[in-house]
Image (cartoon, rainbow, N blue to C red):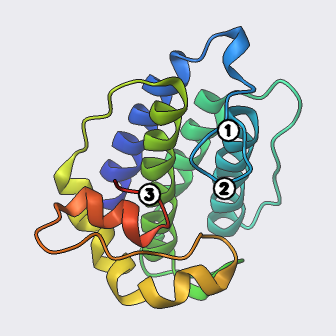
Amino acid sequence: MDNLRALRIANQRFAQHLDGIGDDGWALATPCSEWTVRELVGHVLLGHAHLVSVLTDEQVAPGPGDTFAEWAGRAERAAGLPGVPGRTVRNRVVGELSGDAAVRIRWSDVYVHAWDLARARGAEFTPDQELAEAALEWLVPAGPGLGATGAFAAGTDPGPGADPFTRVLALTGRATG
């Protein structure tokens, strides 16, 4: 799957579930251990800013009042820049990687956090199995080391016959039962 297209889809899914958060929903707990919805959204904004920074060599950070839509657009524009796929960048969690891999990690993160938002608000989440299969391309080889980075909870084994999205959730430390 094309990573820019995947980033757009993941951002749309995240926005869909973020739009369902009312004024009183910002303090809701999420499946991300100690994060509320507000903290989860802040994490996603910071991740988008980090992607923009590494792909453009411009040091940027979200400011007060910045919106998810604004940062999603900036991340998508940066991911679409010429030369991004073959560029070498440094990710604060996994180290040196290609620009294409950095975009893949970003959209995978946003996609899983869209599920987190849906769970926090008690909404249905229908996974896109094509995105899940594409995320597994990097998650499976990285799987055993993800928990050691401190950025993910320890992964679990979802059991035989698990669909691709359930495997993504398990590898990123989410309870799948």
**Mark earlier in primary sequence (2, 1):** 1
Q: Which residue is mark 2?
A: 47
Q: Nearer the viewer, residue 14 or 65?
A: 14
* Rendered image quadrant of residue 50: bottom right
Q: Is residue 148 above or below residue 28?
A: below
Q: Could you tell me which secondary element the residue under label 1 belongs to?
A: helix
Q: Nearer the viewer, mark 2 or mark 1?
A: 1
Look at mark 1 in the image and give the residue it sits on. Answer: 41
Q: Earlier in the sequence, mark 1 or mark 3?
A: 1
- Whether pointer 1 and pointer 3 mark residues with C-beta atoms closer than 8 Å, the reply is no
Q: CA distance from mark 1 to mark 3?
A: 20 Å
Note whether 15 is above or below 51 in the view shown: above
Which of the two residues, 94 or 4, is positioned nearer the viewer here?
94
Q: Badge 3, how many Cα within 10 Å: few under 14, some, many 20+?
A: few
* Labels 1, 3: front one: 3
Residue 175: mark in rendering:
3
Q: Residues within 10 Å of mark 1 (few under 14, many from 20)?
A: many
